[in-house]
């Protein structure tokens, strides 16, 4: 027997689906037109630019980017071809580090103003300060919940009884 969503849950879910379907494409369109990168590529470059010494272990970068290691590896390969990132073996640890090159850092700096403008236009201009704070709270709560349900590997955990 299906446990259908109640009217409020259905309304909330439809809003989430609409947001998930519309926002990524809008971000990609603007970023590709203005800077020649996808939103995910820009996000990876940004995460590297914010990391100590502009480097992160690939597994850590995948986690921060909410990505599979496979998808991240594909994107980092593209960033390497563009001269914006490199990979190297982690010293004294297992794994591979992704490093942001100076050209990659410059790309982030160049793309940031346009990115901030499109994020503000697409998201924050539609919200007041209270709604923005609520969005931040809800996003953090749902992200934490997903991490608990899916676990670090992105797969349902043994304790997830609704699989």
Image (spheres, grey):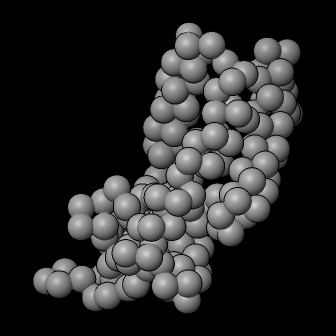
Q: Say whether residue 12 is visible.
A: yes
* The quadrant where residue 34 appears: bottom right
Q: Is residue 129 above or below residue 17?
A: above
Judge from the rendering whether residue 106 lies leftward or rightward of residue 60; answer left or right. right
Furthest-left residue in this view: 92
Place of residue 25 in the rendered image (x, y in percent of width and height, measured from the top left): 79, 53
The residue located at (72%, 22%) in the rendering is 126
The residue located at (30%, 60%) in the rendering is 51
The residue located at (51%, 67%) in the rendering is 107
* The quadrant where residue 68 appears: bottom right
| 28, 138: nearer the viewer | 28
Judge from the rendering whether residue 2 lies leftward or rightward of residue 124; answer left or right. right
Judge from the rendering whether residue 118 lies leftward or rightward of residue 43; answer left or right. right
Place of residue 97 in the rendered image (x, y in percent of width and height, measured from the top left): 32, 78
Q: Is residue 63 above or below residue 128?
A: below
The residue located at (28%, 88%) in the rendering is 89
| 30, 132: nearer the viewer | 30
Q: Is residue 15 above or below residue 69?
A: above
Place of residue 138 in the rendered image (x, y in percent of width and height, measured from the top left): 55, 25
In the rendered image, the quadrant that contains the N terminus is: top right
Place of residue 49 in the rendered image (x, y in percent of width and height, measured from the top left): 37, 61
Q: Is residue 65 above or below residue 135?
A: below
| 20, 109: nearer the viewer | 109
The count of marks equals: 0
Q: Say whether residue 6 is visible.
A: no
């Amino acid at each position: 027997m299906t446990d259908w969503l109640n009217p409020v849950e259905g309304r909330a879910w439809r809003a989430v689906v609409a947001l998930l379907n519309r926002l990524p494409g809008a971000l990609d369109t603007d970023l590709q037109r203005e800077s020649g990168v996808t939103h995910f590529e820009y996000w990876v470059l940004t995460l590297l630019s914010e990391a100590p010494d502009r480097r992160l272990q690939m597994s850590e970068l995948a986690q921060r980017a909410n990505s599979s290691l496979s998808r991240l590896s594909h994107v980092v390969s593209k960033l390497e071809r563009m001269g914006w990132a490199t990979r190297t073996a982690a010293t004294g640890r297992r794994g591979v580090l992704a490093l942001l090159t100076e050209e990659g850092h410059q790309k982030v700096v160049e793309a940031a103003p346009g990115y901030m403008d499109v994020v503000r236009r697409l998201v924050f201009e539609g919200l007041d300060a209270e709604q923005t704070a609520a969005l931040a709270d809800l996003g953090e709560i749902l992200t934490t919940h997903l991490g608990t349900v899916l676990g670090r590997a992105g797969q349902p955990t043994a304790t997830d009884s609704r699989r």
